Amino acid sequence: MKTTKTAVVLTVLLFTATAAAQNGPNQQPTSSNTDTLATELNAVLINTDPVPLQTGEDADAAFKIVNNGNTEAEGVSAEIIDSYPFSLKPDRQRTYQLGTITPGEEYQISTDIRVAEDASDGSHNLKVRLSKDDFSTVVDIPVEVQSEDIDLNLANLRTTPEEIRPDTEDNKLTVSVVNNGDKEAENTVLNLGFPEFLEERSSFSTRQSLGNLQPGQSKQAEFFFDVSEDAPSGRLQVNSTLEYTSDDSTATIQKEETFDIFMSAKPQYEVINTSSDLQVGQTGELRVTVRNTGNEESTSTRVRVLDSSDLPFSYRSSSQFVGTLDPGQEGTTVFQITPESDAVEKEYLVDFEVRGVKDTEVFTESTTLNLPVDKQEQSGSGLPVPAPLLAVLVVLGVAGFYFRDRLTGTEDE
């Protein structure tokens, strides 16, 4: 009887346990756990302008939403949250409906934010709420902030020579960097971005390190450059970037500024055509056509031969007048040249100079021309007379004189 009761109790307990297992609450994975396993949404900073952000100033911020998980996320949205020291400008979009983001896919968002006046230097978090269906999380994006205690500016810009012109070399640009703030700027560097018509000298750089700048201190930077032949006249914009650090931040701060330099116009010259008929021992003509390829009128334009004692030439005049040439206009001048009788038949390299005047300033350009010299042409057939024939002609000539004298003497008798 005791054995029977024990069996009944065990049976009841087993039934009760089974029923409890079947009727008890089912444990479902939470939404947070599911999303942690399935998708990993994150917000990552791309860049800011300026770098770092300045206290009390508006700034551009760009970040991206990335799915680092292994399944797609549907119904994704991103909301920028105002959180000290950052606040979204009132007219800017706050929430972005991104839809479905597949694994590895990213969405980029750019916006304007304002930095609080009393923000401390260092890293602060820009907060973004990421939502997917009934799941949401707030992501912190670290952003560097720098107070406005350092204020670097450019001043005292000048060039040497004062008027920069096309097709010139070794020009110098001098500019001062001034700290108008009340805190020291450390490791200050000035970078210039020359326009395409200005070419940095190979022996110099467009980057100048100026070291530390105390409040109110100024330091000078020098840059050397060439100007291309096709540089346009007028104002040319030069971009610059000031880089520095502060003692209470490890971030490099960048500040962009632009300034103008003035490109003066000038006449420029190009020999576009030559023709000649020079022969050894004979005076011939050389015709030279010159074009004003510059962007300014050239008056009193002349072409001059740079005579050399090594050349077997004499000139009726070594300088010929062309006159006034407007931009793009051509002019032709003629030289009378006599190659010496012992000149060799070949091409000679002769240096010429084109010079003109703008206002009271003289402009010159040199060029080298190839002058071919041919041998002297012979008259008649140009064939030599054979010696036997020449002897016969001499005998006939003498005989002719002899018989003419005999006939004359006979008539006198």
Image (tube, rainbow, N blue to C red):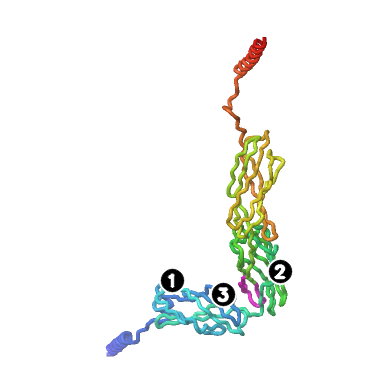
User: What residue sits right under mark 3 in the picture?
Assistant: 49
Mark sitting earlier along the chain (2/3): 3
Residue type highlighted by circle 3: Asp
* Region rendered in magenta: 244-258
Q: Residue at x 41, y 74 (%)?
A: 101
Query: Does the magenta-highlighted stretch encompass residue 2?
Result: no
Query: Closer to the camera, 321 or 65?
Result: 321
Depth check, front residue: 330 or 39: 330
At 58% from the left edge and 55% from the top edge, which residue is drawn?
329
Q: CA distance from mark 1 to mark 3?
A: 25 Å
Residue 10 visible from this viewpoint = no
Q: Nearer the viewer, mark 1 or mark 3?
A: 3
Mark 1: amino acid = Glu
- Marks 1 and 2 sit apart, C-alpha to C-alpha, by 48 Å
Q: Which amino acid type is marked by label 2?
A: Gln
| Residue 233 visible in this rendered orientation of the protein | yes
Was residue 251 drawn as part of the magenta stretch in this picture? yes
Check the picture and name the quadrant holding the C terminus.
top right
Specify which label sits upstream in the sequence, 1 or 3. 3
* Residue 388, horizontal then vertical, whole percent: 60, 16
Circle 1 Cα neighbour tier, 10 Å, few/some/many (<14 / 14–19 / ≥20) = some
- Give yes or no for contact between labels 1 and 3 (Cβ–Cβ under 8 Å): no
Separation of residues labelled 2 and 3 (CA atoms)? 26 Å
Q: Which residue is mark 2?
A: 220
Q: Position of residue 372 (x, y in %)?
A: 61, 39
Is the residue under label 3 in contact with that under label 2 (CB below 8 Å)? Answer: no
Q: Which mark is residue 105?
A: 1
Sequence-wise, which precedes: disc 1 or disc 2?
1
> Circle 3 — which element?
strand
Discs 2/3, front: 2
